[in-house]
Every structure is written in structure tokens, then in C-alpha cells.
Amino acid sequence: MIPIAKPLIGEDEINAVTEVMRSGTIAEGQRVKDFEAAFADYIGTSSAIAVNSGTAALHVALLAHNIGKGDEVITTPFSFIATSNSIIFTGATPVFADIKERTFNIDPENIIKKITPKTKAIIPVHLYGQAADMKSIMEIADDHDLIVIEDACQAHGAEFDGKKAGSFGTGTFSFYPTKNMTTGEGGMITTDDKIIAERARMIRSHGSKQRYFHEMLGYNLRMTDISAAIGLVQLRKLDDLNEARMRNAAYLSKKLDDINGITLPYVDRRCRHVFHQYTLRFNNSIASRDEVAAFLGKKGIGTGIYYPLPIHRQPYYKEIGYDGSFPVSEKAASEVLSLPVHPGLNLTDLDMVLGTLHEMF
């Protein structure tokens, strides 16, 4: 079986965890501080704040910017549901703007159409490992005095115009096992704003700077030293892991270019696409996306559909009154299929994926 994703955990990570376990300090401690400093340095921000999930990173970032009831936050309907749920957690309202056909990322022109006097922030998602159009988005934010919170949960090491995703506005990252780097579970907030960094640290830890003195409402969203120890090792490997993903993606695209009805992943020339997912579009009358997925599955090849139902059409969102039409997102949801691209693949694996697709078509 060739899985759609596979975390690469080696002896270095195991030894790092063992060292923490033997130290007796397994909750938030020095390893977390070291991981925060290393991650901030990698992204190019002055601060990084570790939390226990990517969802927590989004939630805390919004709260740190004082986003709440009565505010609107513009984001994409074509993402994992945590992107918009985190807005609802604060009492604010998600407002959806459709995506661009080729990149799957939020369309800046559609953002402009959704701005109202209640709009306080934009959350662009760097989907599949390719950064959104941050030049246009930051210009819109500057023109309308809006906060930008980047959902970079799939974009560790991705770049736009040579600048890392997560360094334009307030960045948020996930370290779930299937991501480009992992801590088992975990997340990170990145920022150059000292006030936002301080507020985020307080919110993640019961609203306190000093133990047992609570200045604001906060939560228990801390990362453990066990997770941070894994993260420190994975961060050192991240560029090599990303390069392997990019090589695998280039190999797949080169060999799939001759199949009609398949749209290959588009790479914006301004971007360093780190291929969290290698996502094709199937609009071939010979076989539907679901038929292709079923055929590959029978041959032992894992695939993924990210995402089969846009957020505005999820049952809960329909229940709370969301409707409307986002045709580009809806079309993408019916056509996308992701193939294995992770660093654990070898050429034999890739050739098996390619041979199976060619056999079908």
C-alpha cells in the first residue's frame, strides 16, 4: 500500500523525546522556548508562540487581535473547516470569498467585494502548500485598515516573492502528523507585533503572565516539551523534506502531462510551492474523480479529496443560515483528487502511481 501521507519519524526524534522524558520536565518548558525561537528564526518573525494544535493557533491569533462579536472576517470556503470555525469560536462571523481557479487560493478581487464596515480581518489560506497572492491581499488590507491572519497550516516553508508564508501578517501553523513537519499534534503563531505575541502567550495559558495571576480570559492551549522536542528535530529537516516533495511533484507532473482531461497542479511563478498535497483536477469524460480514486485504491494507492464539500455547504453551516453560491469552490470540490507526494516515496512508488493512472486512461 502506498499511503497518501506518511510522517517521517526517525531515531533523532525518538532520542529527543527520550531525553525529555528522562529530564522530568515534560509539560511546557525549555524545549518549547527553544522551538519557538528556532521557528521564529526560520519564518523570519520576531516571535513565535507554540500551542497544542493548528486550530488553537487560529483561535488564539484571532483573540489576540481582539476579534469578536459583531466583527466579520473574510476567508475562503475551500479549506478545512477549522479555518472558519475558529472565527465562530470568537463570536465573529465568517464571510466567504471565492477562490481562484488555478491556485485554489482566495481571489483578491472577491475579497474586495465582501468588505463591509464590519470587516475586521482577512484569513487567506495557503492551500496545498502554495502561498496565496499576498501582495494583493496585503495591499487590500492596508487600503481598508484590516488585519491579516495567514492560515499557513499546510505551508511550512512556502514562500511568496522570496518571503516565507506566515511572515506577512500574523501566521498560524499546524504540526499534525500529515503536515510537512510534525510534532504529533501542535501549532504555532508567528508575528512581529510584540503586543500580539504577549496577548497570545497569555491566552494560551489561562490569561496569565505570572502563575496564578490572571489578567484576562484565557485557555489551556499550551504545547508540551515532548512535542517541542520532536518539532526541533523536524524543523532542522524541513527544507530537505520539502525539496523531496517538490521533486516528487515535478516527476509526477512531467509523466502525467500526456493524459487528456487531467489538470496538473499550477505553480505561481512568484511562489515556492512546498506541495503539502499534489492535487489534480479530473474533468475527463472517460472517468470521474471518484472512479479514479476507487481504481487507485483497488491497486493499493492511497488518495485524498481535499475537500469534497465547501464549508458553506457543510451541514452545520447550512443549519446556522449559510447559503450562497461560490461556483469556483464548488467546481473544485467536485474535481480535486490528491495523489501521494510525501518524502517517504521512492521512484518505484511514484512509477506505480503513474503506471496505474496510465493503465486506467
Image: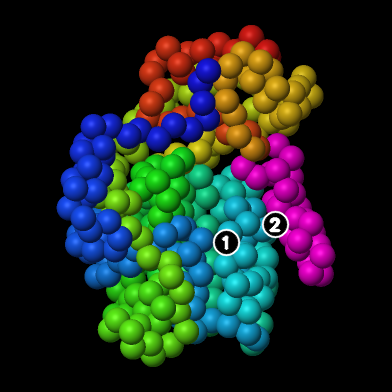
Q: Residue at x 23, y 32 (%)?
A: 11
Q: Where residue 244 sits in the image (x, y, percent)?
A: 34, 31
The residue singled out by tag 1 in the image is 83
The amino acid type, in three-letter code, at marker 2 is Ile
Q: Residues within 10 Å of mark 1 (few under 14, many from 20)?
A: many
Is residue 324 visible in this depiction of the protein?
no
Q: Secondary structure at mark 2?
A: helix
- Comparing 61 with 244, the one in front is 61
Residue 212, label in figure = none
Please indicate whether residue 177 sits to the left or right of residue 124 in the image: left
The amino acid type, in three-letter code, at marker 1 is Thr
Q: CA distance from mark 2 to mark 1?
A: 9 Å
Q: Where residue 125 sits in the image (x, y, percent)?
A: 52, 57
- Sequence-wise first label, 2 or 1: 1
The span shown in magenta is: 306-335
Question: In the picture shown, does residue 68 fall above or below 259?
Answer: below
Q: Where residue 353 sits in the image (x, y, percent)?
A: 54, 17
Q: Residues within 10 Å of mark 2 (few under 14, many from 20)?
A: many
Q: Residue at x 39, y 42 (%)?
A: 180
Residue 311, label in figure = 2
Residue 325: say if magenta. Answer: yes
Cβ–Cβ below 8 Å for labels 2 and 1?
yes
Residue 359: say if magenta. Answer: no
Question: Which image quadrant: the C terminus?
Answer: top right
